[in-house]
């Protein structure tokens, strides 16, 4: 498990891969929402 | 019901500045009641996301209001399910979502939280409660991607809902974003009621330091960047106050106020406004409400006597609420209207009052719909400033 990526590292990867079609500012805002939902869930 | 979208917004903005608008503004707070009222279920909304628009418009076909509190459902059970958490779940009625308190943080972990709040919360604490975040990289990726995909759709649906409320019902949504207090993050998601109660006695300095440490995250979630020098004065930033009603004024001043004020003054300095849900009793904290900048905040009164609140804080903040849910549920229509008349007569002069129910509606049995419709329509017709 030591080589596994952390949740924050995976979040970065998700932003790069899954939100590539969004403008940078919108992608940042969307990831803030996702992080908030994760914390609150 | 011919009032335009802009007339309704102006009505609210005027009263928040303690001036008399043309009519007493009315705020609807319909929560998951909308799902019940429309005859739907949370599951149907999950399976067919566009149902959220249908459900959350349905009550407004007959109910008059000048603004609604929020648009759609934020904390659906699906978001938690995506990452393997059972923090939110659908009640047996099928149309209400409940929150289960999960407190994954130990009191010995304050130094870790203070040193690296984001790393501690996301990499260590979250995998404890969200099972899918405790697995391999691929499992974590799949879980977060599912959440992202869910919100790509849900975010679009909620934007469409706001547009439909505006275009078809001339109805603004009063909440634009959220101002979440740092101490409430710790209370709601890390330590819970019991843990925080002990920490306020046994880990005072660490708790203060932890609130300061997560200020950056709270600022990030607030969404105001340094480049944003001016904010619109509508819609408002909303705070649902959770822990304050449970703590003493001394604890409130020490643990809650310093970091929360930093957050809300970022709004105030840029011209924005705040709507705070004063959950429980706030009488012991009225001095703090009076210390806020005049005409900056709207307080939704839940547990306090609103007539007394008007005398004690009503010159500084706008009050919303007052219409008892119990009366809307069990009272006769005439009694509801008499009480609404009393609210308007005593609270509306001079502005600074928004008519609303005393609590957000969550389930079918919370009100008699006919009482609510008749009472809100009465206030719209009666509450004319001369």
Image (cartoon, rainbow, N blue to C red):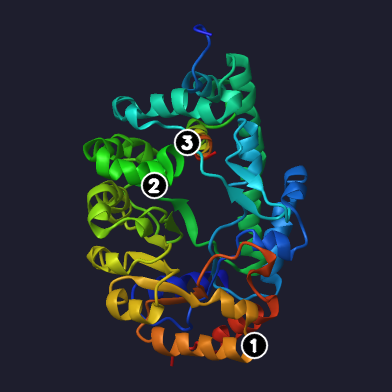
Q: Pointer 2: residues within 10 angstroms few (<14), some, or many (20+)?
A: many
Mark 2 to mark 1 CA distance (whole Å): 39 Å
Q: CA distance from mark 3 to mark 1?
A: 46 Å
The label shown at residue B251 is none
Q: Quickly name the residue at label 1.
A: B332
| Image quarter in which the C terminus of chain B is found | bottom left
Circles 2 and 1: CB atoms closer than 8 Å:
no
* Residue linked to disc 3: A32
**Callout 1: residue from which chain?**
B
The quadrant holding residue B108 is top left
State yes or no: discs 3 and 2 in contact (Cβ < 8 Å).
no
Neighbours of disc 3 within 10 Å: few (<14), some (14-19), many (20+): some
Q: Is residue B182 visible?
A: no
| Residue at x-position 28% and y-position 39% | B207
Q: Quick one: SS at disc 2?
A: helix
Query: Which residue has dot 2 on it?
Result: B184
Observer-side mark, 3 or 1, equals: 1
Q: Residue at position x 34%, y 27% from top?
A: B109
SS class of the residue under badge 3? helix
**Residue B60 horizontal/vertical position (percent):** 66, 69
């Amino acid at each position: 498990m030591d080589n596994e990526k952390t949740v924050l590292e995976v979040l970065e990867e998700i932003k790069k891969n899954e939100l590539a079609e969004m403008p940078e500012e919108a992608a940042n805002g969307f990831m803030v929402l996702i992080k908030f939902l994760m914390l609150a869930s | 019901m011919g009032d335009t979208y802009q007339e309704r917004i102006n009505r609210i903005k005027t009263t928040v500045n303690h001036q008399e608008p043309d009519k007493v503004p009315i705020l609807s707070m319909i929560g998951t009641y909308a799902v019940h009222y429309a005859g739907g279920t949370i599951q149907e909304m999950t399976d067919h996301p566009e149902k959220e628009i249908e459900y959350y418009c349905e009550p407004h076909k007959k109910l008059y209001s000048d603004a609604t509190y929020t648009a759609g459902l934020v904390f659906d059970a699906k978001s938690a399910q995506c990452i393997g958490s059972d923090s939110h779940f659908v009640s047996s009625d099928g149309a209400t979502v409940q929150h289960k308190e999960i407190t994954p943080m130990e009191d010995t972990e304050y130094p870790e939280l203070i040193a690296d709040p984001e790393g501690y919360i996301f990499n260590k604490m979250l995998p404890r409660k969200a099972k899918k975040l405790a697995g391999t990289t691929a499992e974590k990726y799949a879980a977060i991607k599912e959440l992202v995909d869910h919100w790509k759709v849900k975010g679009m649906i909620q934007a469409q809902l706001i547009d439909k409320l505006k275009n078809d019902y001339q109805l603004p949504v009063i909440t634009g974003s959220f101002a979440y207090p740092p101490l409430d993050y710790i209370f709601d998601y890390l330590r819970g009621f019991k843990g925080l109660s002990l920490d306020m006695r046994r880990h005072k300095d660490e708790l203060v330091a932890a609130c300061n440490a997560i200020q950056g995250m709270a600022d990030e979630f607030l969404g105001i960047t340094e480049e944003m020098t001016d904010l619109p004065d509508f819609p408002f930033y909303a705070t649902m106050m959770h822990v304050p009603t449970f703590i003493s004024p001394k604890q409130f001043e020490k643990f809650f106020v310093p970091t929360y004020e930093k957050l809300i003054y970022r709004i105030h300095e840029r011209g924005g406004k705040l709507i705070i849900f004063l959950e429980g009793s706030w009488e012991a904290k009225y001095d703090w409400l009076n210390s806020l900048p005049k005409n900056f905040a709207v307080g939704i009164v839940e547990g306090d006597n609103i007539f007394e609140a008007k005398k004690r804080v009503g010159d500084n903040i706008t009050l919303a609420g007052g219409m008892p849910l119990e009366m809307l549920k069990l009272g006769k229509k005439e009694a509801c209207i008499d009480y609404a008349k009393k609210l308007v007569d005593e609270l509306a002069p001079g502005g600074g009052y928004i008519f609303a129910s005393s609590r957000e509606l969550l389930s079918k049995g919370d009100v008699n719909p006919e009482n609510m419709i008749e009472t809100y329509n009465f206030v719209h017709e009666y509450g004319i400033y001369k």
